[in-house]
Image (cartoon, helix red, strand yellow):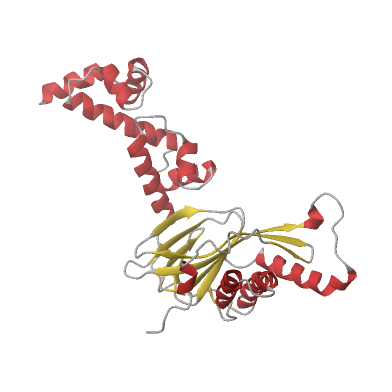
Amino acid sequence: MQPFPYEVMRERQDALERLDLRIRWGYYDIHVLRFHLTQFLPGKIVNFHKHAEFEFHFIPQGKGTVILVDMPYALNEGMFYLTGPDVLHYQEASPDDIMDELCLHVDIIDRRLQPGPPTVTEADDWEVAEADDCISKLRTLPLFPAEDVHQAMPLFLEAYEACSRHYTGSYTTIRQNVIQILLRAVRAYDTVKEPEQAHLPTRDMKAYRYRLAMEYMQANYSGEVTLEDVADKLNLSSRHIQRVFKEAGDGQSFSATLENMRLKAVCHALAESTQSIEKIAQQAGFANANYLHAVFRKRFDMTPSEYRAQQLSIM
């Protein structure tokens, strides 16, 4: 087996991140936020999340799965994908294989949109044009993985070695490597087509998110649970999660689903315990017994006490 060429990067994983790398390219300021090798142990999951910056994910070793917004894709050695600002994504290593990932997070600022006149010399015209072309394409790259056909991954190692060895021109080397990673990522998509999805295992994302929401609510219904809480837990907007409930929950809204969950717990406690109705109301997430009484009577056309008496007569 060939030795893993990036193994040396584990010695000082934060070496490149200790540098405050702010690169000026054309009219753009590129601020490097993360620049490292990380590892996913078998079965490791990073649940749905998003970033405010661009994140490049390269896979030098192993395999796994990525879900970009709501579409799953298989990941294998030699592949990469880009998540731009606010792109929701989920990562998972294969259950029987470690997956390594080379990560580059960059915040890209167009100085032309900032207060004051941007500064660039006439001699930079070609660089300005190429930077504009590259950044424009980065903002519109398709959301699916591609092969690292232009060998951007070795540039991570070259930048690490330049940082570690402090040789002549190390900063210039690192700067050029960052720009080259951006350029080579864009080039990889110039002729690539979206991968065929028929052979990949797919997940019904509405059902999946509905199940996660229900699990969270089931664990927390006794306290204050809001639509915003659930949306934040799943990294979705409140409007999106409300739509998930409507479409995956037989047309029931979030509030109706939560109320049903609480009433089910109340009915079980009334039938199986001798606790006071006030105590049962509080444990099920109702403000007090009076509020439970009103909700219960409206739903079942009887009071909690009458329900309890009915259940005792059946037993």
Which of 176/8 is in front?
8
Of residues 22 and 122, the one drawn nearer to the viewer in this rendering: 22
Query: Picture quarter containing residue 169?
Result: bottom right
Q: Residue furthest top?
A: 290
Which residue is located at x 50 percent, y 65 percent? 12
* 232 w.r.t. 262: above or below: below
| Whether residue 204 can be seen here | no
Q: Position of residue 113 (x, y in %)?
A: 79, 53
Seen as rendered, the residue at the extreme bottom is 1
Residue at the (22%, 30%) spot, across then down? 268
Residue 45 image position (x, y, % from top left): 40, 58
Counting from the top left corner in percent of width and height, residue 109 is at 72, 57
Image position of 32 with respect to 233: above or below: below
**Total numbered circles:** 0
Q: Position of residue 166 (x, y in %)?
A: 62, 71
- Quarter of the rendering containing residue 262: top left
Q: 175 left or right of 46?
A: right
Most foreground residue, 126 or 85: 126
Tell me the residue at 63%/76% (across/down).
184
